[in-house]
Image (cartoon, helix red, strand yellow):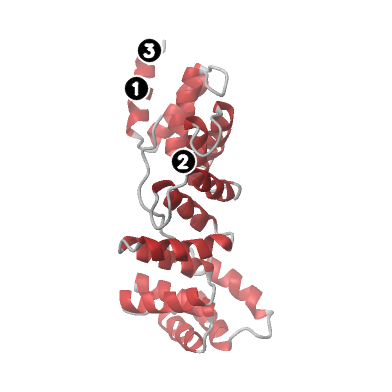
Amino acid sequence: MTDKNESGLQHIPGRAGLSVHSRAAGIIARGRRDAADASANPHYLEAIAAYKAGDFTTAAAGFRLAAEQGHAESQYVLSTMYDEGEGVPQDDAQSAHWERKAAEQGHAYAQANLSFRYYNAENFSEAFAWCQRAAYSQLPWAQYNLGLMYRKGEGVAQSNAEAAHWYRLAAAQNFAEAQQKLAELYYTGQGVALDFAQAAAWYRKAADGGNAEAQFQLAHLYDLGQGVEHDYTQSRFWYRKAAEQGHELAKIEFKRREYRDP
């Protein structure tokens, strides 16, 4: 069972879970929390209100004022708005500028996105350095990305043991891709002791989280009876789940079972 997904780092979209998310849901939740803080930047709070009202131009202007006063969250949100062209013209240079400002103040999401920016430029040493900072802030995307960089030896000496360590930290936060990668290390005995039962357990967690590769590999384990009892019904179930997500090998295996079933 080989890894079909050893691609580059995962980017954290500007809207993913912290601030500008699902048309104001995340930003408003954060705004309510910050509103109770007497030290919250007033421009930031006004920008949140504008964003909630759907006035993205006014929101961007407010975030800009707060960002210029050194407000890290506003710097990060502004960078995502320039990245998306929301309330301001799309501008990669401005996005990168404010992203770095926030990252230098310890904003974990900004650090992770800055890492991704360096990674795309193939500056792996800088990508690793910024990713490591975000990973130490317990950000699961960054922990996963750091695991990938250790696995591939990009920006750091290759180490499967370190990869397993960082995958495990992200996996413990229910990050499905990290669970799938950790399972693979257990299946192949790289960086950890070979353990089919552990492989199956982590594949199951990732499969339950919707990871198509993990669903395919879990089906394979049920088919062979490795780490789990042989179970044709479970094998077919997970092949179907992966096939429904477009996993090509799963489609083939599920089709074979359709022909074989009565």
Residue name at image x 58 percent, y 63 percent: 137
Q: Which residue is mark 2?
A: 211
Mark 2 lies on a secondary structure that is loop
Instruction: Give percent across and percent down for residue 155.
Output: 40, 58
Task: Kindly identify which residue carries mark 1.
Answer: 255
- Which SS class for mark 1? helix
Query: Image height check: is 38 above or below 33?
Result: below
Residue 32 image position (x, y, % from top left): 63, 74
Q: Which residue is mark 3?
A: 260
Residue 4 at least partly seen: yes
Marks 3 and 1, how far apart at CA: 9 Å
Residue type of the residue flagged with mark 3: Arg
C-alpha distance separating marks 2 and 1? 20 Å
User: Residue, x 47% and y 54% (percent of image)?
Assistant: 146
Towards the viewer: 4 or 195:
195
Q: Residue at x 54, y 50 (%)?
A: 166
Of residue 11 and residue 243, the one placed in the foreground of this image is: 11
At a point 47% along the width and 68% down the height, the residue shown is 111
- Cα distance, mark 2 to mark 3? 26 Å
Q: Quadrant of residue 241?
A: top left
Kind of residue at badge 1: Lys
| SS at circle 3 | helix
